[in-house]
Structure formats: C-alpha cells, structure tokens
Amino acid sequence: MAQSDSKLVTPVSLAVDAVLVLGFFAFMATVLASHVPSNDKTNIVIWSCLASACMSGVFYLAIQMCRLVYRAQKRAGQ
C-alpha cells in the first residue's frame, strides 16, 4: 500500500477542530440546560454539561469522518 506524503493531522486542523467542538459544547450546554428536570442551578449545570460532553465527543467523531471521506474522494478523483 502506498504511503501518502500529506499529513492527516496538522496543527491548524487541530485548532479548527478545538474551536468547533468547544463552540458546539457551549451551544449544547445552553440548549440542554432547559431540559434538566431540576430547580437546583448546580444540578442543571452539571447534567447539561455532562450531556453536552457526550454529544461533543460524537460531534468530534463526525468531523473526523467527514474529513476522512472528503480526502478519500479527493484522492479518488485525481
């Protein structure tokens, strides 16, 4: 199998991923806060952040899969 010379992970891609995932985390934490069935502000923050962390992990994996499919299609077209 031939090795490609291009890097799959670069510092710029890591920075872009970090910004996207952190933005998604903050957005989902605010959205999910209204769905926590509690009146205690601490519990609301804890559970919305925990749920948002799980969703952010899935979002990160989705970003990586989209990037991999895009590069594979780009190579196949060459």
Image: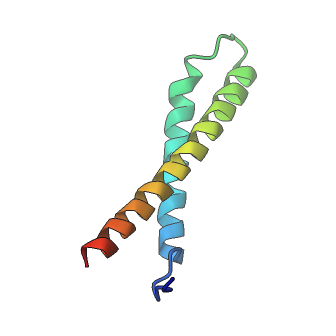
Q: Image quadrant of residue 68?
A: bottom left
User: Which of the image's four quarters has the C terminus?
Assistant: bottom left
Residue 38's place in the image compared with 12, above or below, is above
Q: Which residue lies furthest to the bottom in this view?
A: 5
Residue 45's place in the image compared with 10, above or below, is above
Q: Please state if 61 lies on the left or on the right of 47 as rendered.
A: left
Residue 60 position, x and y percent, is 54, 51
Residue 32 position, x and y percent, is 55, 25
Residue 59 position, x and y percent, is 51, 45
Residue 36 position, x and y percent, is 63, 16
Q: Image quadrant of residue 56?
A: top right
In the depicted view, which residue is nearer to us: 13 or 67? 67
Residue drawn where x is 66% and y is 34% of the image: 49
Q: Which residue lies furthest to the left in this view?
A: 77
Residue 33's place in the image compared with 53, above or below, is above
Q: How many marks?
A: 0
In the depicted view, which residue is nearer to us: 10 or 76? 76
What colour scheme does the image use?
Answer: rainbow
Residue drawn where x is 50% and y is 75% of the image: 8
Residue drawn where x is 41% and y is 56% of the image: 66
